Amino acid sequence: MNEILTVDNLEKVYPNGTRALNDVSFKVNKGEFLVVIGLSGSGKSTLLRCINRLHDPTAGSIRFNGSEVTELKGSPLRSLRAKIGMIFQHFNLVPRKTVMTNVLTGTLSRTGTIASIFGIFSQEDKKRAKELIDLVGLTGKEQQRADNLSGGQQQRVAIARALMQNPEILLADEPVASLDPSTSHSVMNYLKKVQEELGVTVICNLHFLSLVREYGTRVIALKDGKLVFEGPPTDIDEQWFQTIYGEDAVEVTIN
Ligand SMILES: Nc1ncnc2c1ncn2[C@@H]1O[C@H](COP(=O)(O)OP(=O)(O)OP(=O)(O)O)[C@@H](O)[C@H]1O
Ligand SMILES: [Mg+2]
């Protein structure tokens, strides 16, 4: 198959002794929309952070396009990170800067910090930023300050910023957890567009199963740091739901 990411026997033990990932193995194919689910504390964020090497795994292997990335340092690590975009629950924009400047910040991995601090961006980068702002439906908002936007709009700026680095994979850690239901769908639809139209592989942590069913092409579930489910969203029946979320859990639907 056309694998972009292969994770084998991944383990992450934090310095305080917490085993956040325990023998996790799975593959991701190019162009998939993989959703990661599991209870709070099950290891979802830790997994994403190991993939882009914000955290160092304790053991196991992560291969990106066939190359081992768990040991990378220095410039090879920077070039790995340039290929992996990330968006977060709380958007992490620079609040006082404009939409345009925030999106241009996505070139950081290429431009370097100094150029970006002084706002030295090429015409080509500005053109690309404008295209991406259009792509996420924010045409006309280029000069608006990020902190004057709604949550959903801010997350769309974050998507455009992540795309500025032309990533092969986009990691999204609970991208809609701070948003209301209809805004959540809007943001998820833009992520879907990124996957379907730009061919970017998306790996997304989500809480609501209804969103998982609507947007995911495949699901993995973590429980206490272990992989307990892997398959299409339609395979998660009542029994799997209880295995993943516990006997007493009740499914909440987001419409
Ligand atoms: N920096 C850290 N140091 C020590 N333990 C940590 C650290 N980060 C996370 N943990 C622990 O690792 C486990 C997995 O945490 P993680 O944040 O990956 O879970 P999660 O599935 O993303 O949860 P949530 O749904 O609440 O975001 C938890 O027990 C957590 O307390
Ligand atoms: Mg998390």
Image (cartoon, grey):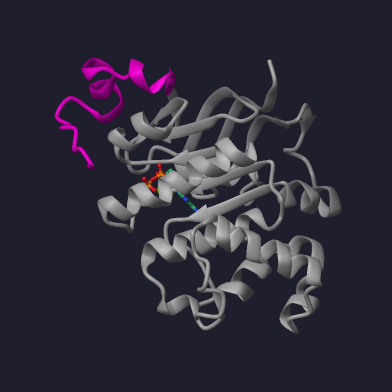
Residue at 54% from the left image edge and 24% from the top image edge: 23
Residue at 42% from the left image edge and 51% from the top image edge: 187
Q: Which residues are magenta?
A: 228-255
Q: Horizontal placement of 125 versus 193: left or right?
A: right
Q: What percent of the width, then of the height, locates residue 45?
A: 48, 45
Image quarter (top left, top right, bottom left or bottom right) of the C terminus = top left
Q: What percent of the width, then of the height, locates residue 33?
A: 52, 32
* Above or below 104: residue 169: above
Does residue 13 appear anywhere in the picture? no
Which residue is farthest front? 140
* Above or below 161: residue 203: above
Q: What percent of the width, then of the height, locates residue 41?
A: 37, 43
| Most foreground residue, 74 or 27 | 27
Q: In the image, is residue 253 part of the stretch drawn in magenta?
A: yes
Choose top left, top right, bottom left or bottom right for residue 178. Answer: bottom left
Q: Horizontal placement of 65 versus 48: left or right?
A: right
Q: In the image, is residue 61 part of the stretch drawn in magenta?
A: no
Choose top left, top right, bottom left or bottom right for residue 2. Answer: top right
Does residue 202 appear anywhere in the picture? yes
Q: Horizontal placement of 7 versus 24: left or right?
A: right
Which residue is farthest right? 75
Say how many tags the image has: 0
Choose top left, top right, bottom left or bottom right for residue 163. Answer: bottom right
Q: What percent of the width, then of the height, locates residue 40?
A: 33, 43
